[in-house]
Amino acid sequence: MRGLFTASLVAAGLAGRVFAHTSASHNDDGPVRRRKSLGFGPIHPHAVFRANPPQVHAEGLAPRADADPFDVARRFAEVESQGQSYYVRPDSYTDKNTGVTHVYIRQLVNGMEVADGDMNINVKDGVVLSHSNSFYTGSAPGVLDTTPEAATVHAEFCAKLGDELVNHHATFAASSSGQVVMGSQADKEKLEPIQHVYDSNCAHVDLPSQFATGSDAATFDPYKPLLQFMIAAAPTRAASADILSKYDEYLSKMEATFEHHLVGGAEQPLGHIANVPSTVSPVKARFMYVQVPSGGKTALHPVWKFEVEMEDNWYEAAVSVSEPHHIISVVDWASDSPIPSPKPPADKKGATYNVFAWGINDPSEGNRTIEKENFDAHASPAGWHALPYANDPQSESLRKKKTEFWRNTTTTWGNNVFAHEDWEGRNAWVDNYRPDAGESLEFDYKYAPKDTDSSEALEEAQKYINATVTQLFYTSNLVHDLYYRYGFDEVSGNFQQYNFGRGGKENDAVIANAQDGSGYNNANFMTPPDGQNGRCRMYLWNTASPYRDGDLEAGIVIHELSHGLSTRLTGGPANSGCLGWGESGGMGEGWGDFLATTIRSTSNYSDYAMGAWAANRETGIRNYKYSLNETINPSTYKTLDKPGYWGVHAIGEVWAQILWVVSQRLIEKHGYSDSLFPPTPLANGTVPEGDFYRPQEFTAAGVPKPLVPKHGNSLSVQLVLNGMKLQPCRPSFFDARDAIIQADEILTGGENKCELWLGFSSRGLGPNARVDGRTPWGGGIRTDDYAVPSACKPETVPEEPKAPEDDDGDEFIYM
Ligand SMILES: *[C@@H]1O[C@H](CO)[C@@H](O)[C@H](O)[C@H]1NC(C)=O
Ligand SMILES: *[C@@H]1O[C@H](CO)[C@@H](O)[C@H](O)[C@H]1NC(C)=O
Ligand SMILES: *[C@@H]1O[C@H](CO)[C@@H](O)[C@H](O)[C@H]1NC(C)=O
Ligand SMILES: *[C@@H]1O[C@H](CO)[C@@H](O)[C@H](O)[C@H]1NC(C)=O
Ligand SMILES: *[C@@H]1O[C@H](CO)[C@@H](O)[C@H](O)[C@H]1NC(C)=O
Ligand SMILES: *[C@@H]1O[C@H](CO)[C@@H](O)[C@H](O)[C@H]1NC(C)=O
C-alpha cells in the first residue's frame, strides 16, 4: 500500500509530463530536472453558480439601469448571505469592455476570513446577471474550535484524500498512452516526503514528537504549520530530510514580522516569515478559516494561509492551526506547460526585430522576417521599450536620470515584459543578460544552430541567445497587447509595471526567462495576485539535435502567458487560488492550449497538435491533436473518468478540445477574421470602422454598447475571456460552460446560444451532464449528455410547452 501510495503521489504532484529523450541525453550528470508540484483541496458540495438569479430590489422598486452596481451587489449579498458577515474585496471592478461589474465578496466568521467562502456577483444595468456562492452556511464555531468533533471532520477529509490516491493509482498505472506522467526513480523520490505528512488514514507517521497534536495546539503560531508544509513541499527528499533532522534549529530561526494597519480592511494582519528553508523570499502568512467537507455540508477549520515562493513553485497553502501536520489545501501558482497619466513618449521610433512573425507557430512553419514594434497604442501607450523610472526595478542604479519620468530602453526591458537569459536557472533576473540594440533599436541577431555532438548542443543553443530573447520579448508583448484588447486590462489584473492611471495594481510586468537552466522539455508560469510580477520560464528541449528552443515555439509561450490571464480573471485579480486542482486546474491548462491553437489557426481549417516542434513528435505533447474528427480526437466530458485523466494537463486537453469544437461552430456561422487584433482606437476613443467589429450600437440613452467582434474566431476569444470574468472561483466545466453562454447573452443578447450548446453537447457537456462524488483531487463519476435545450434542437417542430426551467439551459442550477 505504501508503495502504491507513494507512486500515485508522483502522478499527482507533477503538473507537467516528460518525453523520453529521443537524442542527446543529460540523464545522469545533467541539468534535466523536473519540478515537483502539489495541488489538492476540499470540494464544496454546496457551491453554486447561477445565471439569471431572482433579483433583489429596494422596496419593491424595479431595477434601475443607473443604479450603483456595488449597491446592487451589496443588496443582493445581504439577502444571499443569510446574515453571515462578509466584505467586498477591493479588487472588484467594472469591466469597460462589457459594462459588467464583477463584485468579489469574501465571507467573515468571527471576524476572520473564510478563505474559500466566496461570492462573485456580476452586475450590469442594475441587474444581477449571475452569481456564485460558496459561503459556509453553518453556525460560527468557537474562535479556535479544536474540539474532537472538528478534528474528526478533518480526519474524514484526509482519509478520502488518501483513499483517492490509492484508487487513482490503481487505475492510473494501466494507462500511459502517450501521456507519460513520470518515470524515473529519482523523480519518485522527490515526492516521497509528502508521505510523512499523509498516509491513507491521514495520521502522521515517522515524525518527531514535537509534531504531536494536543499540547502544541494551544500556541497557534505559524512556525510549525509552515515547517510541516515545507517538509512536504521541499523540492527533494534530501531537503525534506534536512528539515526533519534539524527541525528545532529551523524552528528557532524562523522570524515573523506582522504588518498591522491602523485602519485595517477586513483582512487579518499579514505576517512575513523569514528564514524558511527552501524558500526564496519571506513567506506571507495569514490566519483564516477554510471549509472542510462534513457529511454533505462543510465545517470550518482554522488555518494558516501561506504564500510560499520557492525556486520552482509558488504555493498558496492552508495548513491546520491546531494540527500542523494537516495540509488542507494547496495551490501552486506555477503552471507547467506541456511536455513532452503623464503623457507617454510620443513619436517614438519603433524598434524592429528579426523574428518568427506572429502567426508562425514555430520554426518548422516559416522563416524569420524583420517585424516592427507592432504595439497597440491603446494596450501599450508607451510602446514596448519604455517605462517610468519610478516603476523600474533597475532605477536604484540609474539614480542620475530620475528627474525624467520615462526611461527609454534599448534592450528587451519594458513596461509589459522583462526578457533575458537565465542559463543558471536562478531567481535573480534584474541583471541577467539581455540583447542591447542600441539607438537603432534593430534587434537583428543570428539564428543558425548547427547539428552537434550532444556534449556541445547546449553551447550551440546559447550562441543564439540574442535571437531567442528577442523572440520571447516580441511574442510576450504581442500577447499582452492582444489580451488587453479583449479585456485583460489594468483593473482586471493584467501584467504591467506602470498602469497609466487606469487602475489595478502595478509593478507586475512578466519576468520572462529564456533558455532557463532549471530544466529541459517544459515551460512554466507563476501567477501571484495582481501587483506582483508573473514569472515565465522557457526551456530548451533536448528532443532533437540541434536542441529546440521553447522560446521559438509561440504556442508554448502563449500557453504559459495564458495561465496569467486565466488565473487573474477567475475569481478576481487578487485571488490566485481559483484554478488549483481538478477541473478548475485542468481548464487553466486548457484555455492556454485553446488560445494558442486559435492564434495559429488560419481560414483554412486544420487540426493542430500542441508543442509538436519542441517535442519533435507529430502528435505533440498531448494525447490527441485538436480536431473536429471524433476518430482523431474522441475526447468528451466523460473522458475525465478514464485512467490517466486526473492530472491537470489531461483534463485541460479535454476542455481545450471542447472549446475548439465550440469555436468552429461560431466560425461556421460568422466566418473568419484573418487577424485577431482589433484596429487601434482613434484619439477620441472610437474604434475606426472596419471589418473587425460589427457596427457600433448604442443604448436608448445614447451610450455606446460594447463592441462585438464580427467573426467566429475573434468572437470565440472574446466570449472565452468574458466567461473567465463571470465564472466563480474554483469553476467546474459546467460553470465555465455556463459562463461562456452567459457572456454571449450579455454581449450579443444570446444570439449564439444554440451554437454554443450544440458545440458543448456534441462533446458530452449538454445541460444534463453530471458528475457524482467529486473528490479532493478532481475525481468523480461523470455522465455525458448529448442533448441540447429543446429550443436548439435542429430541424424539429416546436415542442409542446414545458416549464421554463426544462426548456432553457440558462435556468439550470448546477450544484
Ligand atoms: C524617450 O523617447 C522620447 C521619444 O523618442 C523622447 O521624447 C524622450 O526625450 C526620451 N527620453 C529620454 C530620457 O531619453
Ligand atoms: C526558409 O527559407 C529557406 C531558404 O530560403 C527555404 O528553403 C525553407 O523552406 C524555408 N523554411 C520554411 C519553414 O519556410
Ligand atoms: C549578442 O549581441 C551582441 C551585440 O549586441 C554581441 O556583442 C554578442 O556577442 C551577442 N551574443 C552572442 C552570444 O552572440
Ligand atoms: C488557404 O488555402 C488556399 C488554397 O490552397 C490558399 O490559396 C490560401 O492561401 C490559404 N490561406 C491561408 C490563410 O493559408
Ligand atoms: C476522421 O479521421 C479518420 C482517421 O484519420 C478518417 O478515416 C476519417 O475519414 C475522418 N473522418 C472525416 C469525416 O473526415
Ligand atoms: C472620432 O474621430 C473620428 C475621426 O476623426 C470621427 O470620424 C468620429 O466621428 C469621432 N467620433 C466621435 C464620437 O467623436
Image (cartoon, grey):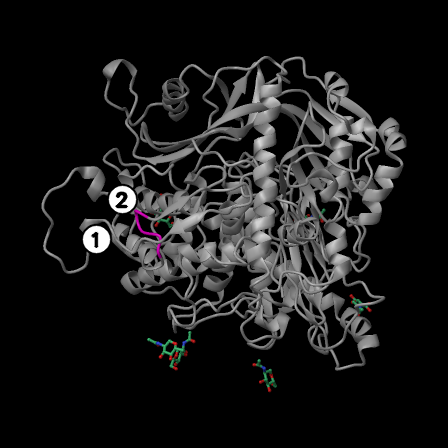
Above or below, 406 relative to 547: above
Label 1: few (<14), some (14–19) or many (≥20) C-alpha neighbours in 10 Å: some
Q: Report whether residue 131 is seen.
A: yes
Magenta region: 764-768
At a point 87% along the width and 42% down the height, the residue shown is 242
Mark seen at residue 430: none
Q: What number is the disc on residue 792?
A: 1
Report, in whole angstroms, how far the alpha carbon at label 2 lies from the one at label 1. Answer: 10 Å
- Residue type marked 2: Gly
In the image, 707 versus 751, the foreground residue is: 751
Disc 2 target residue: 809
2 or 1: tag closer to the N-terminus: 1
Secondary structure of the residue carrying tag 2 is helix
Q: Residues within 10 Å of mark 2 (few under 14, many from 20)?
A: many
Residue nearer the viewer, 283 or 37: 37
In the rendering, at what x and y percent does residue 110 appear?
56, 14
Q: Amino acid at mark 1?
A: Cys
Q: What SS does tag 1 mark?
A: helix
- Give the image location of residue 580, x and y in percent: 57, 43
Indicate left or right for 65 with 115 as reference. Answer: left
Any part of residue 40 in sight: no
Of the pair 490 and 274, the residue shown nearer to us: 274
Residue 766: say if magenta: yes
Query: Is residue 742 shown in magenta?
Result: no
Q: Are marks 2 and 1 in contact (CB under 8 Å)?
A: yes
